[in-house]
């Protein structure tokens, strides 16, 4: 039962949770697209601008190299270097590049570029240079431009974008989880109420707001439906009660008259027995109905279950012996309980009587009293799983071939008596039939 | 012995009237609660048979009013056992016994007799009851047939004693069950039948000149054998 509840309350089993996962996936894709687009529009464009400028410079230098001799070329380069924000380095026998003490070897030829950090001793800080080289007849010329602002922007953008992405997905997941839990809770509330109704509590209703959401409207509809069901049930109940009451007086007349005639006509005994059987079924039904509806006041006293077991064993032993059966009482610990003596007697009596009827010839019937429990166990052929569920229903007979006298109300009455006393009734069938009554 | 019968159904009232007269009782009848209460408070009765559902004044109200006047006349309630009605409430209101409709006249007669006996109790002169050649002494739980002891189980003893107490009368199963096993319950024909069969067998073996007759549909009657 507990496990079942856990399964019910696991929000991950909810359809909302599955929707959440799908929604999270869509959100992730959309976010990725948006981030890429923004990146390309803002930062990608700037990077490309830098590259374009370096490329333009490359074209200019290549033109210079083809036009001038070596000396003029390098003089011209000096001029370029002083007038623009593009840094130009070279390494040749003519003149060593000045600003950089070291040029890495892996600088690609333009238009490809590489970014590497440089310590600017003048400013005392590390700068990031985007560099590429130009091959000329006078040697490799390295072009660079300081792009640390752009690089910083790219790093910041990436980190902010990643965090935004992670937080957005996490929030989607979290809210999805919370929503599905809330959703499930309400569905489970519906389920629990439906279960109550199933178990016979027809007056169970769903609480809801008047102007609420779709669940509130559903609850209102279900309540209306239950009202109708309960009303019909009460109507049938009322009819039964009225029939019962209206029949009692004529039945009394009939019984008194038959009994009087019996003195002269002893063969009327058969009719009288039939009448008694009708009356008994009638009374049993009425009693059951009233027990089920709590209209049967209990006369509470302390009951010694051992006494009850011994009395019943004593009363039914001769009947059992007629069937070649025996009744044993086994008391491992005494159990005193508060209850209605006559009703509890009837409950155990019905169980033992059923065992006598259905366990078959030669069976042993045990009444076992343990701590806070009393069981009636037989070693007969038992019943199957399906019947076990149905046995406590009114007029249920497991096997038509096993029709015996009785009203099919026996176990239903036992169940009602147990419910009335807040006792539990467990039926099981392993190597025979076992009915166990326990107190919480 | 004078009884008061308060019952609204005319046929049943007339039937019961005749049947009780045949048993040697004197009877006053009333068809509604008001008149019933008036009679019950003004006259003296040995027992009152009171229907639970009555016109004008409900049976339970009659009973409460009667007890309020201090009258202790034993009251047997006849009940249709419908929605508002039950044994516990009836007995709590001051009823002495409770019988559910439809009932058997034999049972009603014995219950009324028991009520009167209980109410006007005086110690019996003897603790012995005899019938034919059998004597039962309840002071020492002994049963003798022709001065020879018969071995009976405690419940068999109680069974025989009840039958002897009501010898020659029809005793119903519920009555027997109530007095011997002391549960208010109808255990069905067969259960009591086998106990009676055992007792019968023991009595026959001890050659008691008694007969426990089974009256189908009603119960049992203990009488001396016709020999």
Image (spheres, coloured by chain):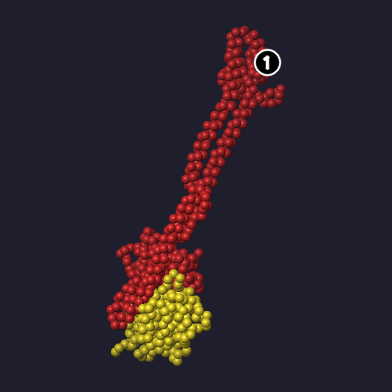
Chain colours: A red, B yellow
Please state the horizontal and vertical placement of residue A175, each as a whole percent of the image: 54, 44
Q: Is residue B152 visible?
A: no
Work out whether residue B82 or residue A141 is closer to the camera in this orientation and state it: B82
Residue B124 placement, left or right of A94: left
Q: Residue at x 56, y 19 (%)?
A: A111
Please state the horizontal and vertical placement of residue A145, each as a whole percent of the image: 63, 21
In the picture, residue A164 is in which quadrant?
Answer: top right
Q: Is mark 1 on a helix, strand or loop?
A: helix
In the picture, residue A265 is in which quadrant?
Answer: bottom left
> In the picture, which quadrant includes the N terminus of chain B?
bottom left
| Chain of the residue under the numbered disc 1 shown in the image | A
Q: Which residue is drawn at 65% across and 14% down?
A: A80
Work out whether residue B54 or residue B208 is closer to the camera in this orientation and state it: B54
Work out whether residue B183 or residue B59 is closer to the camera in this orientation and state it: B59
Tag 1 residue:
A82
Residue A175 placement, left or right of A367: right
Please state the horizontal and vertical placement of residue A300, each as a whole percent of the image: 50, 72
Q: Residue at x 58, y 17 (%)?
A: A55
Mark 1 burial class by Cα count in 10 Å: few <14, some 14-19, many 20+: few
Please state the horizontal and vertical placement of residue A256, each as a whole percent of the image: 35, 78
């Amino acid at each position: 039962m507990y496990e079942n509840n856990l399964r019910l309350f696991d929000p991950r089993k909810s359809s909302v949770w599955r929707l959440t996962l799908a929604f999270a996936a869509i959100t992730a894709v959309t976010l990725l697209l948006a981030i890429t687009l923004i990146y390309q529009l803002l930062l990608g464009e700037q990077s490309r601008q830098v590259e374009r400028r370096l490329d333009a410079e490359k074209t200019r230098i290549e033109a210079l190299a083809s036009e001038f001799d070596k000396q003029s070329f390098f003089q011209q380069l000096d001029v370029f270097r002083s007038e623009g924000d593009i840094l130009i380095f070279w390494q040749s026998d003519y003149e060593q590049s000045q600003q950089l003490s070291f040029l890495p070897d892996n600088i690609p030829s333009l238009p490809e570029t590489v970014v590497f950090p440089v310590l600017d001793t003048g400013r005392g800080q590390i700068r990031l240079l985007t560099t590429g080289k130009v091959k000329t007849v006078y040697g490799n010329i390295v072009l660079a431009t300081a792009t640390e602002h752009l690089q910083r922007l790219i790093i910041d953008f990436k980190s902010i974008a990643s965090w935004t992405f992670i937080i957005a997905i996490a929030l989607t997941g979290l809210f999805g989880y919370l929503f599905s839990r809330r959703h499930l809770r309400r569905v489970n509330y519906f389920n629990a109420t439906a279960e109550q109704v199933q178990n016979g509590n027809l007056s169970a209703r769903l609480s809801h707001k008047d102007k609420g959401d779709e669940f509130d409207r559903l609850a209102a509809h279900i309540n209306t439906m239950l009202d109708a069901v309960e009303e019909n049930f009460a109507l049938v109940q009322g009819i039964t009660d009225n029939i019962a009451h209206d029949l009692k007086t004529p039945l009394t007349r009939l019984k008194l008259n038959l009994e009087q005639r019996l003195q002269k006509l002893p063969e009327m005994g058969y009719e009288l027995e039939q009448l008694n059987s009708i009356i008994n079924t009638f009374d049993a039904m009425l009693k059951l109905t009233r027990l089920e509806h709590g209209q049967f006041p209990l006369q509470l006293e302390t009951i010694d279950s051992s006494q009850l077991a011994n009395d019943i064993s004593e009363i039914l032993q001769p009947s059992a012996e007629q069937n070649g059966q025996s009744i044993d009482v086994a008391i491992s610990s005494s159990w005193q309980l508060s209850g209605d003596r006559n009703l509890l007697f009837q409950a155990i009596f019905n169980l033992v009587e059923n065992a006598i009827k259905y366990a078959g010839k030669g069976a042993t019937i045990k009444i076992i009293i343990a701590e806070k429990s009393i069981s009636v166990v037989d070693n007969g052929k038992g019943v199957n799983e399906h019947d076990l569920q149905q046995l406590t229903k009114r007029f249920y007979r497991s096997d038509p071939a096993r029709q015996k006298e009785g009203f099919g109300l026996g176990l239903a009455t036992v169940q009602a008596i147990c419910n009335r006393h807040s006792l539990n009734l467990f039926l099981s069938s392993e190597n025979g039939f076992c009915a166990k009554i326990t107190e919480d | 012995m004078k009884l008061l019968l308060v019952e609204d159904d005319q046929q049943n009232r007339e039937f019961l009237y005749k049947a009780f007269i045949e048993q040697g009782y004197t009877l006053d009848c009333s068809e509604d609660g008001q008149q019933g209460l008036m009679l019950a408070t003004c006259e003296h009765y040995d027992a009152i048979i009171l229907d639970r559902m009555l016109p004008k004044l409900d049976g339970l109200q009659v009973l409460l009013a009667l007890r309020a006047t201090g009258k202790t006349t034993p009251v047997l309630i006849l009940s249709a056992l419908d929605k508002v009605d039950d044994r516990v409430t009836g007995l709590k209101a001051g009823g002495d016994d409770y019988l559910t409709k439809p009932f058997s006249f034999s049972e009603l007669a014995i219950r009324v007799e028991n009520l009167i006996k209980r109410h006007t109790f005086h110690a019996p002169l003897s603790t012995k009851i005899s019938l034919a050649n059998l004597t039962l002494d309840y002071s020492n739980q002994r049963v003798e047939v022709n001065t020879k002891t018969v071995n009976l189980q405690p419940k068999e003893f109680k069974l025989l004693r009840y039958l002897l107490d009501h010898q020659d009368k029809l005793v119903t199963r519920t009555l027997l069950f109530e007095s011997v096993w002391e549960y208010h319950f109808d255990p069905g024909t067969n259960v009591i039948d086998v106990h009676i069969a055992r007792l019968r067998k023991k009595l026959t073996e001890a050659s008691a000149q008694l007969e426990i007759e089974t009256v189908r549909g009603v119960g049992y009657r203990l009488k001396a054998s016709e020999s």
